[in-house]
Image (cartoon, rainbow, N blue to C red):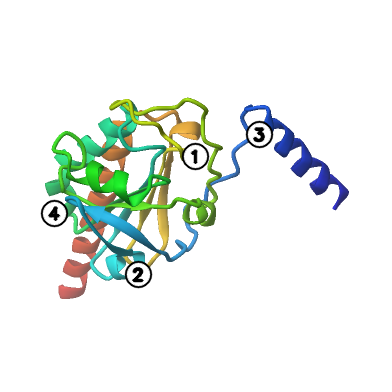
Amino acid sequence: MKKNFVAAMAAGVLAALGMAVPCRAALAAGSKAPDFTAKASRAGKAFTFSLKAALKEGPVVLYFYPSAFTGGCDLEAHTFAAEKSGFEKAGATVVGVSADDINRLDAFSADPNYCAGQFPVASDADGKIAASYGLAMSPPKAGAADVRGVKIAHGFIPRTTFVIASDGQVVSVLSSNADHLTPDAHVKKSLAIVQKLKAGQSKGARAVAN
């Protein structure tokens, strides 16, 4: 207990000094994906996203990203939007999660240069959803602003993608921190994974039919 207390105190000091706190381990492949509901936006319209409901339709690509309207996140959202048909053919739902508030996400989800109304983005303002997936949100950065010059007042969730099978099991975890993946690589790799899931289901169906 003493060691835990000292570690917590050290982390608090580092955070207060604006230094990085070591990341916790993300939820591993093979784990059950924690269920959640969250305020979300698609094409500028707010609604409540439910992971449980989405999984009834097929696999879910759940990707966490630091902030809307920032370079890497903009590229990632644009690439997911551009590859929408591929995810649809694989029967997969894509949802992005960040600590952005719903007003920022309304604009981001509708912008033709980014999400373009092709998939929902959800708000995890307090970082609880991220924490349930083993991701620690960093403190807000003083003076941080987005590509529009608008201040970013929230913390940042590390860029991490979870591919979740329709039974709720995490089948793959992609991390920019651990795997050194570029934002668009998250899209390409997660698409390849859900395509393999789809192919595996088709083979299974044919085997049963035969």
Kindly identify the amino acid type of the residue bearing the numbered disc 3: Ala
Residue 89: image tag: 4
Q: Position of residue 194 (x, y in %)?
A: 26, 51
Are the two marked residues, 3 and 1, in contact with CB atoms closer than 8 angstroms?
A: no
Are the two marked residues, 4 and 2, in contact with CB atoms closer than 8 angstroms?
A: no
Are the two marked residues, 1 and 2, in contact with CB atoms closer than 8 angstroms?
A: no
Kindly identify the amino acid type of the residue bearing the numbered disc 4: Lys
Q: Which residue is mark 2?
A: 52
| Mark-to-mark CA distance, 4 and 1 | 34 Å
Between residues 113 and 167, which one lies in front from this camera angle? 113
Q: Residue at x 52, y 27 (%)?
A: 142
Q: Nearer the viewer, mark 1 or mark 2?
A: 1
Between residues 51 and 115, which one lies in front from this camera angle? 115
Give the mark nearer the N terminus: 4 vs 1.
4
Q: Which residue is mark 1?
A: 155
Element carrying mark 4 = helix
Quadrant where the image shows the C terminus: bottom left
